[in-house]
Amino acid sequence: MSDTETTNRSYHNPSILHADFSPLSDFMLENETNSTMGERNSFGCVQVHVPQELFLALGLISLVENILVVLAIYKNRNLHSPMYYFICCLAVSDMLVSVSNVMETIFLLLNDNGLMGMHPGMLRHLDNVIDVMICSSVVSSLSFLCTIAADRYITIFYALRYHSIMTTQRAVNIIAVVWLASITSSILFIVYHTDNAVIVCLVTFFCTTLVFNAVLYLHMFLLAHLHSRRIVAFHKSRRQSTSMKGAITLTILLGVFIICWGPFFLHLILILTCPTSPFCNCFFRNFNLFLILIICNSLIDPLIYAYRSQELRKTLQELVLCSFCFGV
């Protein structure tokens, strides 16, 4: 997705898959070495080599998992609600990461083995497509995490008015706006990738969404207990319990997202603050590890859905069993 990604994942052919978000491409290309696990460079940095096959394997597993989540939500009518529509879109965002990673890895493997004779201009266009997909995934994932948090907030504090506030049509409109904004901003980011303002926008958006989610979750967990005491009827109490379970699930999703995407955004921050520092250069050299974390995020999310939602877990089990029986 970036110049650093290009140099890390294809240093044998630096013209393949140009870099986008990092002004350090020339600096890193000059200092890049063919490293293996635990190899140290002249600065004493340890650079970890990640096999292309690992990227491909994780990307394929993540892709299958998220496809199953989308199919499960589509198949089970009990899951046809705004919250699960947003979760479905979050799964699609994870799929963008998986698809882009699989595409890029296949291109790199074919190129490394001399099996692809594509024109460099065509490879650059393909890289632009991959970059837009990854950037769209970042923006849309953060947006849908905020949307899901807002949906849970409304469910907890405006339970009696929820269905009038969050209608299906309104949810569809929100989804359309998020995807349109994500794709448009991603294209603009790629077009102006040489401008540091792009990195500033991404980091600012990341921090803003984290603060937004933190405020909503803090308010939910501080007042939910007091709120639940005022609910006497059993069915309302049950709804409150279900809503809080959804809030806890989304808190886990947000925590996993921060852990998996945090190093990538720290990478962007260091590009702005210390692009030529030896210490920062050591951090840049292990960009592949940050990519693995990003892929792991798209792999872990479906497991969280399945673990926290009994209805979704049941439907996923049915899909897997049907697929297995059909294969047999």
Image (cartoon, rainbow, N blue to C red):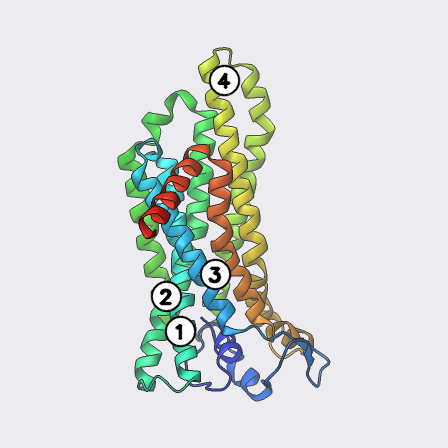
Residue 171's place in the image compared with 222, above or below, is: below
Q: Residues within 10 Å of mark 3 (few under 14, many from 20)?
A: some
What residue type is disc 1 on?
Ile
Residue 121: x and y in percent read 31, 84
Which three-letter amino acid code belongs to the residue tagged 3?
Leu
Spot occupied by residue 219 in the image (x, y as percentages of width and height): 56, 32
Between 119 and 66, the one lying in front of the other is 66
Up-down relation of residue 85 to residue 49 (above or below) = above
* Vertical placement of residue 192 versus 327, above or below: below
Residue pushed farthest right?
44
Q: Which residue is mark 3?
A: 202
- Residue 73 picture quarter: top left
Residue furthest to the top in view is: 232
Q: Which residue is mark 2?
A: 132
Residue 135 is at least partly visible in this image: no
Cα separation, mark 4 vs mark 1, equals: 51 Å
Rendering coords of residue 87 (x, y %): 40, 43
Tally of numbered discs: 4
Residue occupied by mark 1:
106
Badge 3 element: helix
Residue that label 4 marks: 237
Residue for point 35% across, 42% down: 72
Q: Earlier in the sequence, mark 4 or mark 2?
A: 2
Q: Nearer the viewer, mark 3 or mark 4?
A: 4
Distance between the alpha carbons at the discs numbered 3 and 4? 40 Å
Which quarter of the rendered picture does the N terminus lie within? bottom left
Taking the spot 36% from the left edge, 51% from the top edge, the residue there is 67
Asked if the residues shown at circle 4 and circle 1 are in contact, with their CB atoms under 8 angstroms apart, the answer is no
